[in-house]
Amino acid sequence: NAGVTQTPKFQVLKTGQSMTLQCAQDMNHNSMYWYRQDPGMGLRLIYYSASEGTTDKGEVPNGYNVSRLNKREFSLRLESAAPSQTSVYFCASSEIRSGNTIYFGEGSWLTVV
Amino acid sequence: QKEVEQDPGPLSVPEGAIVSLNCTYSNSAFQYFMWYRQYSRKGPELLMYTYSSGNKEDGRFTAQVDKSSKYISLFIRDSQPSDSATYLCAMSDGSGYSTLTFGKGTMLLVSP
């Protein structure tokens, strides 16, 4: 089992460019998440999808869009990248149950210059 | 007051030491408590999962929850250099689609 797989692992963008981070999970989980992690700020939730067909904003959604393509896949799009979006992005998934233990991917390192 | 407080460290200990990592929280509705370990340039991985108050042991790791004090701890016995990582606490009230609330993490360095 691969768990949660993210691509790409590293990306450098110019300000104003767009890109999509891809995420897939093979654990048959219903819920999926996108987090960003910055030094001193911890993990911050960008968007989540409680189940296939639904998406909701998290703590820091501005500048991002998401698509829950199917039960396995959840993508994060930066329409017009800004230097403030330089960060490490983590995709995660969980079952719908009390406690919501979350399983993370390996991360995508994004630099916007 | 932040919802979850965690000392960022770094916490430096010699190999073999007993390590205590802690988080305090303010939301009395939290019932599910987790510890994640994150190695450098890797994603967080679930280490311990506890429901409500009490202790849970797994090998060298013990998770402790004191809901009356809103305080959780992770103890590592016989610490090893391979334990060097950032440890994040996380918690949830478990209601519906509630997401986890994370601490910012404590960096642990275990020297040989």
Image (cartoon, rainbow, N blue to C red):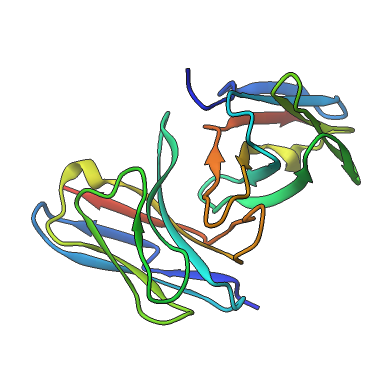
Residue B46 in picture, x, y percent from top left: 68, 52
Task: Give residue A34's position: percent from left, percent from top.
Answer: 41, 57
Q: Residue A13 appears in which quarter of the rendering?
A: bottom left
Identify the residue shown where x is 24% and y is 46%. A85
Above or below, B7 relative to A69 = above
Q: Position of residue A27 (x, y in %)?
A: 62, 76
The residue sitting at 41% across, 32% down in the picture is A41
Question: Quick one: quadrant of the N terminus of chain A?
Answer: bottom right
Q: Residue at x 64, y 29 (%)?
A: B28
In the picture as drawn, the residue positioned furthest to the bottom comes out as A70
Q: Quadrant of residue B64?
A: top right
Between B2 and A113, the residue placed more toward the observer is: B2
Name the side, left or right, on which B4 lies relative to A52: right
Q: Residue furthest left?
A: A16
Front-most of residues A110 and B62:
B62
Position above or below: A23 against B110: below
Question: With A97 as the anchor, is A57 left or right in this view?
Answer: left
